[in-house]
Amino acid sequence: MTNITFDDEMGRLQRDLAKCEDMVARRSTVLEALNLRAGERVLEVGCGGGFYVYECGRLVGSKGRVAAIDLSADQLAATRELCADLPWVECQVANALDLPYGEAEFDAAYGVQVIEYMVDFGKALREIHRVLRPGGRFINLATNYHSIVWHSEHAERMRRVMEAFFAHAPYVDLPSILAPALRKAGLQPIRQRAVPIVNMSYSENSFSALVAKLIAPYVVGRGAITREEANDWLAEFADLEQRGEYFYSATPILTEAIKLA
């Protein structure tokens, strides 16, 4: 599904990322779009460390149901630990291309930065359509990765880093092709809107600083740059921060859809 493997260290960094201010704000936007009510049944495809799952569990309450799937047992273990006081949350290792649920089991489903990693994402959308009830809601958030602007005084090195990074997912600009794919799967897109991220500081807990720590070993592993170049790439951001010249922006897109029948 993806060229990135979520080992213990990668999973830890991803969970740290989920706690940063930009991701807290993004969760609020996704949850607002989901508009969950008490007693509803909701599915998260690719739950990661479980931060969305926990909030959904609190929103639907003990009469509701939250189902969470992921391919990583480590991520699911973190989700179970986080949601230990919410027994109506259920987690299991499963593939979005073959959801282990019956037809029309859920009132809502969502995925955050996950569908773009599936080579056959159309099949995943058909599976989501199958498990949603008529009128059920689907929310997806994915980044148009070519929208990233990351200031650097070493343009050629930055180009090599970003081109290598763009190989991390089969569909790095998924939002641009998502609406027709939803219609083909039987889901009606309602709207798409930007949820931009802008960092003017390279503080250690900023979104872009944490993302940089994920990107560096990945692009080194692909042979795009040497380990020394990766260290210099990271060091430049700290230098730009000291000079008040740091800048990063990206454009995730929130897509809302419903199942008509």
Image: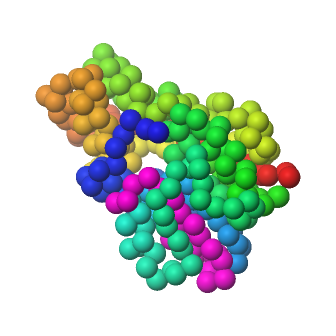
Give yes or no for residue 48 being in the magenta stretch: no
Which residue shows up at 56% across the image and 43% down it?
115
Among all residues in the image, which is located at the extreme left?
228
Residue 134 vertical position relative to residue 223 in the rendered view, above or below: below
> Which span of residues is magenta-colored?
53-74
Relative image position of residue 156 (x, y in whole percent)? 30, 16
Among all residues in the image, which is located at the extreme right?
261
Which residue shows up at 44% across the image and 57% down it?
48
Relative image position of residue 146 (x, y in whole percent)? 50, 27
Relative image position of residue 94 (x, y in whole percent)? 50, 56
* Residue nearer the viewer, 102 or 240: 102
Which residue shows up at 41% across the image and 33% down it?
168
**Total marks in image:** 0
Q: Quadrant of residue 38?
A: bottom right
Q: Can residue 194 be seen in this snapshot?
A: no
Residue 71 vertical position relative to residue 165 in the rendered view, above or below: below
Which residue shows up at 52% across the image and 46% down it?
114
Q: Is residue 238 left or right of residue 29?
A: left
**Colour pattern of the rendering:** rainbow
* Residue nearer the viewer, 217 or 153: 217
Q: Can residue 140 be seen in this snapshot?
A: yes
Q: Is residue 107 left or right of residue 261?
A: left
Residue 122 vertical position relative to residue 146 in the rendered view, above or below: below
Q: Is residue 136 left or right of residue 10?
A: right
Among all residues in the image, which is located at the extreme top?
156
Relative image position of residue 244 (x, y in whole percent)? 30, 38
